[in-house]
Image (cartoon, helix red, strand yellow):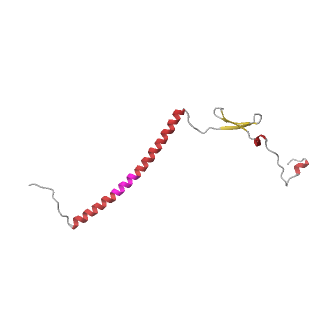
Amino acid sequence: MQTRSLKCKLTNKQLDERRDKLAEHVEKLRGLESEKKSASAKFKELIERTEIDMVEVAIEIRERAEYRDVEIASEKDFKRGVEEVTRQDTGEIIQTRVLRPDELQGELYQVHPDRQDHLDGEAV
């Protein structure tokens, strides 16, 4: 006996079964597309972070240095009229600036208007 694939009319029951099956496939496809979008966003974020990390390391290699938090000290030299900022780990002076005129003047003693007892020679 020979067979051939021929078009056959579906019954109403078969049509209902096919509709249910199609609805399942549509729902499954939506879920897969949503998962794909979420996974794609996650991978995009991972790729971007990796690219940033690569650039940071490449810069460190090119400059043969990296940035770290280092303790510093600031000292004003009133004789020279400058302030110097020094690294505490190496002692290197990393910044020198000229003091402003108001910094060179120092602090003035202020008298509180309600307290005049210091004017009588008594300690405050």
From which residue to which does the magenta span run? 29-37
The percent position of residue 52, horizontal first and vertical second, equals: 49, 42
Which residue is nearer to you in this view: 24 or 61? 61
In the shown orientation, is residue 21 left or right of residue 122? Answer: left
Q: Which quadrant would residue 14 be assigned to in this image?
A: bottom left
Which residue is nearer to you in this view: 115 or 5? 5
In the shown orientation, is residue 18 left or right of residue 71? Answer: left
At 45% from the left and 47% from the top, the residue drawn is 45
The percent position of residue 104, horizontal first and vertical second, equals: 77, 40
At 56% from the left and 34% from the top, the residue drawn is 65
Q: Residue furthest bottom?
A: 12
At 28% from the left and 61% from the top, the residue drawn is 22
What is the chief secondary structure element of the magenta stretch? helix
Q: Which quadrant would residue 83 be assigned to in this image?
A: top right
Q: Which quadrant would residue 71 be assigned to in this image?
A: top right
Q: Is residue 70 above or below residue 121?
A: above
The percent position of residue 39, horizontal first and vertical second, equals: 40, 50
Count of numbered circles on the image:
0
Quarter containing the N terminus: bottom left
Which residue is nearer to you in this view: 8 or 21? 8
**Residue 101 colored in magenta in the image:** no
Q: Is residue 59 above or below residue 41?
A: above
At 27% from the left and 63% from the top, the residue drawn is 19
Q: Is residue 96 above or below residue 107?
A: above
**Residue 32 colored in magenta in the image:** yes
In the shown orientation, is residue 8 left or right of residue 107? Answer: left
Q: Residue furthest left?
A: 1
The percent position of residue 50, horizontal first and vertical second, equals: 46, 42
